Image (tube, rainbow, N blue to C red):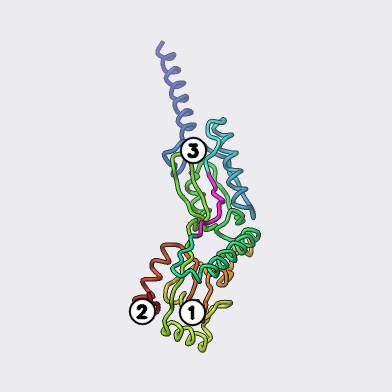
């Protein structure tokens, strides 16, 4: 009888050990407290694959692993940025509208070549089995320069930035002189008006360039100054497309240095 009890204890111990191993194998490393991150996916490798295709594949694997109870873990917003024109001089509005149109035309080209910040950007990376989707998609969003946000219904990726403004700046002779100094020193950015280049120097504006992939692991910056800046010398006005936050800080820096008027 004692021998039988020992065997039963041994069997129970083995079963508990197996259950423990099974439980460990299903534990998500750095898991998030949401159902969309509760399933172990197989290791997945992607080579030079558009972000949109990666998202689609991951959602399919989550649906499979969850037996259809979770059909979407990652949401990708591919909508164009909303560009608001702030015009205090009606005579400038046609020029501002033309600049916005030029930006939109450029955007079509950037999407076509898979520029960073868009869903067509191509990535090469491996999703490790048993790891949180948070781990891999934060890495992907950094590399692809997409906005990342977690919500109870899933990970939300979107173009960065989704809000832009077109504003006008009445520049002073001091900024024009700074622009001339940059020109004489051959420090004007490529394909950029000297006044716009001076604006970048002072404000730290960043929308004048965009990252273009050159390989599975490399990128170069392509200038797009003529899509976000327009200098009108006869009015001493610089038109700028930027994020609302950058516009606000730019106006403050320029005013403090006496580079813009009211």
Residue pointed to by mark 2: 257
Q: Is mark 1 on a helix, strand or loop?
A: helix
State the residue in front, 180 or 64: 180
| Residue in the foreground of this view, choosing between 23 and 54 | 54
Residue highlighted by disc 1:
235
Q: Name the residue under label 3.
A: 36
Residue reaching furthest top? 1
From this view, report whether residue 224 is shown above or below residue 233. Answer: above
Q: In which quarter of the image is residue 105?
A: bottom right
Label 2 Cα crowd, 10 Å radius (few <14 / some 14-19 / many 20+): few
Q: Which of marks 2 and 3 is in front?
A: 2
Picture residue at 58% right of the left edge, 77% below the top: 191
Does the magenta run of residues contain 95?
A: no
Percent x, y of residue 247: 42, 66
Q: Give the range drawn in magenta.
A: 75-83
Corner quadrant of residue 222: bottom right
Residue count near mark 3 (Cα–Cα under 10 Å), binned few <14, some 14–19, many ≥20: many
**Residue at point 42%, 20% (across, down):** 9
Does dot 2 land on a helix, a strand or a loop? Answer: loop
Which is nearer the N-term, disc 2 or disc 3?
A: 3
Pointer 3 or 1: first along the chain: 3
Which residue occupies 64% across, 55% down? Answer: 48
For marks 2 and 1 on the same chain, the one whose residue lies earlier in the sequence: 1
Instruction: Check the picture and name the quadrant holding the N terminus.
Output: top left
Q: Residue 74, image x and y in percent?
A: 53, 44
User: How far apart in space, not on screen, are marks 3 and 1 (Cα)?
Assistant: 55 Å
């Amino acid at each position: 009888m004692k021998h039988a009890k020992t065997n039963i204890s041994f069997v129970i111990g083995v079963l508990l050990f197996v259950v423990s191993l099974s439980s460990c194998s299903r534990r998500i490393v750095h898991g998030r407290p949401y159902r969309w991150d509760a399933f172990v996916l197989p290791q997945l490798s992607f080579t030079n694959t558009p972000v949109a295709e990666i998202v689609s594949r991951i959602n399919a694997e989550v649906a499979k692993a969850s037996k259809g109870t979770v059909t979407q873990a990652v949401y990708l917003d591919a909508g164009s940025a909303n560009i608001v024109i702030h015009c205090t001089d009606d005579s400038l509005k046609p020029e501002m509208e033309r600049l916005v149109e030029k930006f939109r035309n450029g955007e079509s080209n950037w999407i076509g070549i898979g520029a960073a910040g868009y869903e067509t950007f191509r990535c090469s990376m491996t999703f490790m089995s048993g790891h949180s989707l948070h781990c891999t998609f934060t890495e992907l969003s950094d590399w692809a320069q997409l906005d990342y946000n977690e919500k109870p219904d899933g990970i939300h990726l979107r173009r960065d930035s989704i809000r832009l403004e077109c504003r006008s700046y009445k520049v002073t002779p001091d900024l024009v002189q700074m622009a001339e100094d940059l020109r004489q020193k051959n420090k004007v950015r490529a394909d950029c008006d000297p006044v716009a280049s001076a604006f970048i120097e002072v404000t730290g504006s960043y929308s004048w360039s965009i990252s273009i992939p050159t390989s599975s692991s490399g990128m170069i910056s392509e200038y797009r100054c003529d899509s976000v800046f327009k200098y009108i010398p006869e009015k001493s006005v610089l038109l700028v497309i930027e994020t609302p936050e950058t516009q606000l800080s730019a106006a403050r820096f320029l005013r403090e240095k006496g580079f813009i008027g009211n």
